[in-house]
Amino acid sequence: MWPLIVKDMMQNAKALLLFYISALSLPTAYYLIKSPQSDSSGFVGVTFSYVVFGAPILFAVWFIGQEKVKGTFRFLKILPISGMRVILAKSLTSLCLCLILMNFILLVIPLLLRISGIPMSISAPRMVLWLNLATIFFISLNTLVFTALDHKIATQISIFCMMAVGLGAAIAGKLLAPLLAPHGYGFGKLTGLFKNEPGILYFIGFLILIFSAAMIRLAGRILERAEWPDLEES
């Protein structure tokens, strides 16, 4: 499995380096330009959009989509390794790269800025945990989609879903907040409910991990049962 992980990283080394540089630079630049105060909500928002939503799609394109385009998935079937281990190796590569990057952005960069004399609040541990869980979920989802479908269709579906979720959340916040606020309902009350009922949060987090593992397992099954022509795309 380790040779597969090294192969994916070496094969996409330049793209990964450029992505890491941009992912470290954009949230920091946004914070310094937009809101150089202690409030880091914009910084976290850019990180969420770029790493939690964007990175899983990019990594699925590089690690799975490009394998189909180049036809190298066929040769992986010849090797004495199961399709499940191939998908597991690619999933672990994506997870490690994404989680290390995101936690560095959320925890280390604010600390470095504070040491430099720039005021910035450190991300709350619970929020960091949920962003990690969201990253695991989206990586698993994109791994399944790109394994099961043509990479062009998979890319379109992933980007459309990402835009739909973001647009839906923005519209819901703008339209529903003014209607619910007079009746005492709002985001603050919802988060307060979760804080008072930590069991709900743990249960949701457990479900995310279960669904993520199930999606990776299903992707491995699909690769194992795929016929030779299905492993190559024009």
Image (spheres, helix red, strand yellow):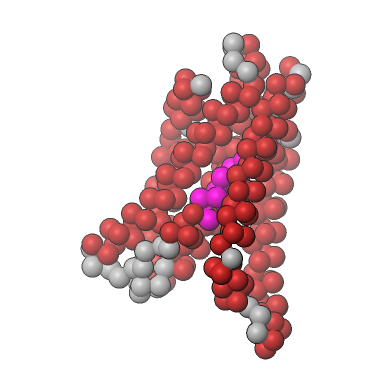
Instruction: Give the total of numbered labels.
Output: 0
Can residue 22 be seen from the camera position used here? no
Q: Is residue 166 left or right of residue 44?
A: right
Tell me if residue 199 can be seen. yes
Q: Is residue 4 left or right of residue 60?
A: left
Q: Is residue 19 above or below residue 6?
A: below
Quadrant of image for the C terminus: top right
Residue 54 in percent (x, y) is at 56, 50
Say which quarter of the image contains residue 31.
Answer: bottom left
Whether 33 is among the magenta residues is no
Q: Nearer the viewer, residue 217 or 195?
A: 195
Look at the magenta stretch and give its main secondary structure. helix
Q: Pinpoint residue 215: horizontal percent, then vertical percent.
A: 67, 38
- Determine whether 174 is above or below 86 in the image: below
Q: Position of residue 220 (x, y in %)?
A: 66, 27
Which residue appears at 60% of the width and 44% of the height? 209
Give 203 or 89, whichever is nearer the viewer. 203
The residue at the point 46 percent across, 30 percent down is 9
Q: Indicate yes or no whether the magenta region holds residue 131.
A: yes
Q: Residue at x 59, y 12 (%)?
A: 79
From which residue to which does the magenta span run?
Answer: 130-140
Which of 127 and 15 lies nearest the eye of the viewer?
A: 127
